[in-house]
Image (spheres, rainbow, N blue to C red):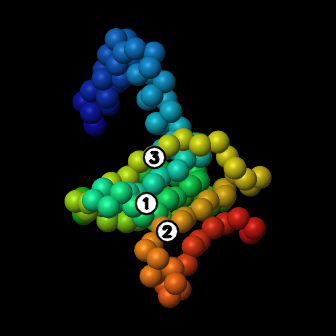
Amino acid sequence: MKHKFAAISLTLAICFGGCTKADKVNYNIRQQAENFQTYRRVIAINTRTNDTLFSVEGLISLDIDSDGDLNVTIKTGEDEYKLFYAHLGNDVTYTCIQLEPVSTTPYAYQISFFPTKEMIEHGLIDIVSSEGE
């Protein structure tokens, strides 16, 4: 355990000693985002068709597990969280952008699906949002 801590400390010291200001800012922004301090939007895209599949907005943390699932943990209250996940296949990728809060409540979130027209017409999709709660 002591060796692991020493290695991490040395890595951080080297990075902060020899990294550019942009590297330091990037690191700090990522840490804030992963600690649910930054409002972000994740968008999944089918790269074969260029269709947007879904987006998730809110105070979120991202992780890709060993099965290839994109895990989006959404902070919905002081000590409340929801998990949204989607499988990332060969034709599906995602992007994430930092946003400013768009709601009066700090724990607002939104999940939107962008399905094919047939799915919308037959009512197979339910869009979830915390707005108005």
Q: Residue 93, can we see it? A: yes
Give how far apart the Cα atoms at labels 1 and 2 are: 8 Å
Identify the residue shown where x is 58% and y is 51%: 59
Q: Earlier in the sequence, mark 1 or mark 2?
A: 1
Foreground pick, 68 / 127:
127
The residue under the point 30% across, 56% down is 47
In front of the other: 27 or 97 = 97
Residue hosting label 1: 52
**Disc 2 target residue:** 113
Quadrant occupied by the C terminus: bottom right
Task: Name the residue furthest bottom.
Answer: 122
User: In this rendering, would 59 be left or right of 63?
Assistant: right
Mark 1 vs mark 3: which is more N-terminal? Answer: 1
Write down the residue under mark 3: 96
Name above or below for residue 39 compared with residue 3: below
In this rendered view, identify the residue nearer to me: 98 or 31. Answer: 98
At label 2, counting other C-alpha atoms closer than 10 Å, the crowd grade (few under 14, some 14-19, many 20 or more) is some
- Residue 45 position within the rendered picture, expressed as x and y whole percent measured from the top left: 38, 57
Give, as a three-letter code, the residue at label 3: Cys
* Nearer mark to the viewer, of 3 and 2: 2
- Secondary structure at numbered mark 3: strand
Question: Which element type, helix, strand or loop, lies under badge 2?
Answer: strand
Amino acid at dot 1: Thr
At x 55% / y 47%, what residue is drawn?
A: 40
Type of the residue with mark 2: Phe
**Which tag is nearer the camera, tag 1 or tag 3?**
1
Q: Is residue 64 visible?
A: no
The percent coordinates of residue 44 (x first, y second) are 40, 57
Quadrant for residue 130, please give it: bottom right
